[in-house]
Amino acid sequence: MGVSMYRVIKPLNNSVAIVRTESGEQAVVMGSGIAFQKKKGDLISPDHIEKVFTLKNKESKHNFSTLLKDIPLDFITTTYEIIENAIDHYHYPVQEYIYVTLTDHIHLVYQHILKGQYELSRLPDMRKDYPVEFRIAEDALEMINQRLGITLPDDEIGRIALHFINAKGSTVGRDDNNLFAKNIIILVQNELRNYGITRNEANQNYYDRLMVHLNYFLERISDQNEDKNQFSTDFEQTLKKDYPKAYEIGDNIYHLISKQIDRELSESERVYFTIHIQRLL
């Protein structure tokens, strides 16, 4: 690290400050007592700093400030460590928003456990398809339990892995399939938003399951191994009659994806989408 000093922008508590690095980037630095009696403009020596998180762009600076208002600092720093571990040890590319969504998630789960309101996710087992994400999530669970002194259930491994699956970034040398799938998922999320459906505390299980289904489905398409199992047209008509709203949204998503990939999908996908969306409604 050499002798580059950090200039304080804002001390957050005795051990944490937002600083500017010599290269002009904003960062969050942590270390026991490093910000004690420091004020804006003071210098902090790197000798006592235990961790540095660089806030690379406007979005991450804004996100960090927003999180600080609502969430205790140790949750934020633990989540940042989890993400840094994914990037450093697994060379896993992430999109910036995971810093916020994962911090939110861990804090929410913690509150649910405290109130005795924790519910198992019943997500399908994706370990075989996403081994790296699962290893990252296993590390994450260990870090959370150690740093935050709480014991999260193993069920959280799947949920945390899903956060990484959904927020996977693209780096040089990655195939374009992943970016292609990402774009489709964003389109689907926008379509859901048009109907007032966004991921929230009440629906997160069902929303996540729909996203898992989409991820799997888009992977199958890119492998050209798409399942052709058909539901009976009777069943589809029944759904259409019983759940007109869910069917309408499911049908829109079905056509949206068809158009994007420029080929007909299996009819059964429309049924799957309708069922997932009915749960969300």
Image: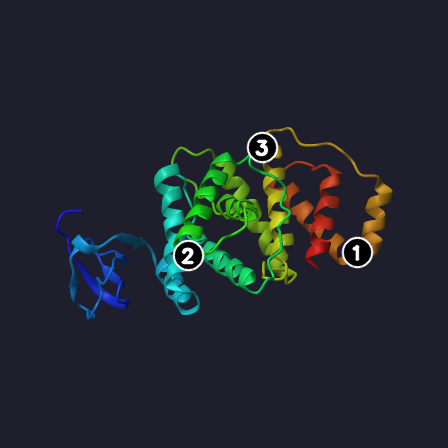
Residue displayed at 70% across by 53% down: 277
* Residue placed under numbered mark 1 in the picture: 243
Residue 171 as seen in the image, left or right of residue 273: left
Q: Secondary structure at mark 2?
A: loop
The spot of residue 152 in percent (x, y) is 51, 52
User: Which mark is first along the chain, 1 or 2?
Assistant: 2
Residue on which the image places disc 3: 222
* Distance between mark 2 and mark 1 Cα atoms: 44 Å
Label 1 environment density (alpha carbons within 10 Å; few <14, some 14–19, many ≥20) = some
Q: Residue furthest left?
A: 3
User: Toward the viewer: 61 or 126?
Assistant: 126
Expressed as whole percent of the image width and height from the top left, the position of residue 133 reads 48, 40
Residue at 68%, 46% in the rendered image = 255
Q: Could you tell me the amino acid type at mark 3?
A: Ser
* Residue hosting label 2: 148
In the displayed orientation, state which residue is furthest to the right: 234
